Image (cartoon, helix red, strand yellow):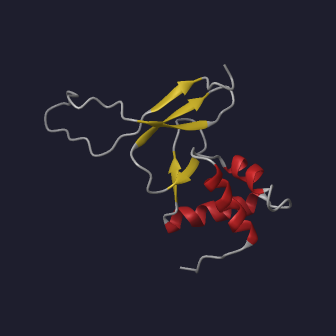
């Protein structure tokens, strides 16, 4: 495994994730990180994000029919809201899984992810 590269580009990408508390698409990361490194390219963003996932610093957020977004690892349990107008994804605190959910006999829930969709306040 190669050592983590501390470059201006990597620092700008890390700052993008530090600025917001929601999952980001690679394009959102590129737009935000270009505030610090104007000539940053998409290939560098993908490379850095993939390295950060391998290192455990980022976690992919999968949405049906969408490219993954990424958020910092180690966050408390939460779900997501996807605005179908602006395409942004937001964290939703709390859990919608009812504790008394009736599973078929012998089934055990080990993990779950719930994504709500609609319009965010900016798009309403």
Quarter occupied by residue 109: top left
Q: Residue 76 in the image: state x and y as whole percent.
A: 40, 48
Q: Residue 34 in the image: state x and y as whole percent.
A: 80, 56
Q: Residue 89 in the image: state x and y as whole percent.
A: 58, 37
Give the residue at the far right of this rendering.
39
Q: Residue at (44%, 52%) from the top-left corner?
A: 75
Total numbered circles: 0
Of residues 98 and 68, which is closer to you in this image? 98
Quarter occupied by residue 95: top left
Where 14 falls versus 80 (above or below)?
A: below
Give the residue at the far front of this rendering.
19
Quadrant location of the C terminus in the rendered image: top right
Of residues 65 and 84, which is closer to you in this image? 84
Q: Residue 80 in the image: state x and y as whole percent.
A: 49, 36
Q: Residue at (20%, 28%) from the top-left corner?
A: 100
Q: Residue at (65%, 46%) from the top-left corner?
A: 25
């Amino acid at each position: 495994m190669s050592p983590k590269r501390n470059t201006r580009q990597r620092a700008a990408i890390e700052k993008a994730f530090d600025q917001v508390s929601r999952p980001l698409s690679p394009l959102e990361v590129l737009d935000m990180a270009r505030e610090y490194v104007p000539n940053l390219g998409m290939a560098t963003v993908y490379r850095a994000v993939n390295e950060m996932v391998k290192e455990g610093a980022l976690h992919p957020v999968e949405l049906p029919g969408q490219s993954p977004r990424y958020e910092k690892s180690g966050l408390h349990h939460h779900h997501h809201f996807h605005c179908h107008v602006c395409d942004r994804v937001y964290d939703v605190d709390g859990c919608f899984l009812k504790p008394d959910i009736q599973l078929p006999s012998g089934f055990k829930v080990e993990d779950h992810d719930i994504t709500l969709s609609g319009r965010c306040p900016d798009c309403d």
